[in-house]
Amino acid sequence: MNTHQIERRTVRGHQGEVSVALQGNPQGTAVVLTHSILSSGAMWEAQAALLAERGWRVLRIDTTGHGHSPAPSGPVSMDGLASDTVAVLDALSIARAHYVGLSLGGMSGFGLGIHHADRVLSLVLCDARADAPPAVAAPWDERIAVAQAHGTCEPLAAPTIARWFGQDFLADQPAACERLRSVAASTSVAGFVGCARAIQGLDYLNDVGAIRLPTTLIVGANDGVLPAAMRDLQTRVAGSVLVSVPNAGHLPNIEQPDLFNAFLLSHFARLSC
């Protein structure tokens, strides 16, 4: 088995085609990885290799309008993004999978756990919240206006990377930051706008108590208000575990990969998988 070989498939999602990268053991238990807005499945490269080497079947979904997935053909909703994950599982004849989502992927992961629990073995939700109060929703209007005015996500790319990481990482890892900036800049305007509107409509907080799946919540300790938001979520999701990654911001899987990977593997060990 070549754990580094990647196969790419295209699946019909709720608003167009969705691209998924497949890696690892085709007979292994499936793990789905989903990413933040203005990113792609490429942000999970290290974790995909780690899991594939351990015998998992790894599915990295490029969210609509991001990465290899073309721009959506209509409005994007958080429920729709969750249904895209189900569409990928259906297309690959996978009954149930573990789900790992960060930021936007974590937000839709709450919807997946609420509405499609029968398709999920467990949840790892990272640096995500389950609601969008006005203070969270409002800044997206300005970002949407910038993208639409310029017809590209290029003006959003550098500020987004600066928000995700601390200054030390920006100075010490310029190559990694440039790769992420390039992915952000290449995101389609329709994909960004659709997913930003989905974030503004995020409304799962009152329903997360219905989640009864094994759940681990991971958050970068330096990720603004999200550590507090995720502490609140941990009290709402019965039996969930919350872990904080020190010296990390919004993408702890990239900023502190060794610690993040240890927490990820600990989640699976807890399930005796």
Image (cartoon, grey):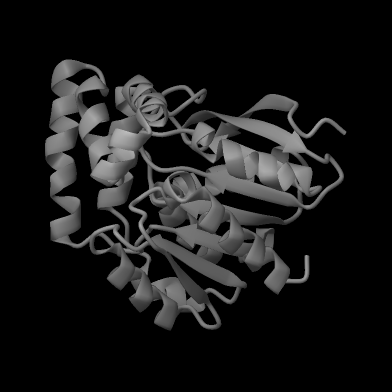
Asked if one can make out residue 69 in the rendered structure from this viewpoint, the answer is yes
Asked if one can make out residue 116 in the rendered structure from this viewpoint, the answer is no
Image point 83% across, 48% down: which residue? Answer: 28
Image point 48% across, 78% down: which residue? Answer: 237
Q: Quadrant of residue 263?
A: bottom right
Residue 216: horizontal and vertical position, in percent? 54, 68
Q: Is residue 21 left or right of residue 193?
A: right
Front residue of this view, candidates 118 and 19:
19
Front residue of this view, candidates 242 and 201:
242
Front residue of this view, candidates 135 and 177:
177
Front residue of this view, candidates 49 and 212:
49
Residue 194: horizontal and vertical position, in percent? 32, 36
Q: Is residue 115 above or below residue 240?
A: above
Q: Is residue 68 left or right of residue 142?
A: right
Quarter of the picture holding the C terminus? bottom right
Residue 54: horizontal and vertical position, in percent? 78, 49
Number of marks in the image?
Answer: 0
Q: Residue furthest top?
A: 151
Residue 213: horizontal and vertical position, in percent? 61, 72
Q: Is residue 239 above or below residue 189?
A: below
Q: Is residue 67 above or below residue 265?
A: above
Image point 47% across, 62% down: which residue? Answer: 110
Q: Quadrant of residue 89?
A: top right
Image point 40% across, 25% down: which residue? Answer: 175
Quarter of the picture holding the N terminus? top right
Q: Is residue 23 above or below residue 226?
A: above
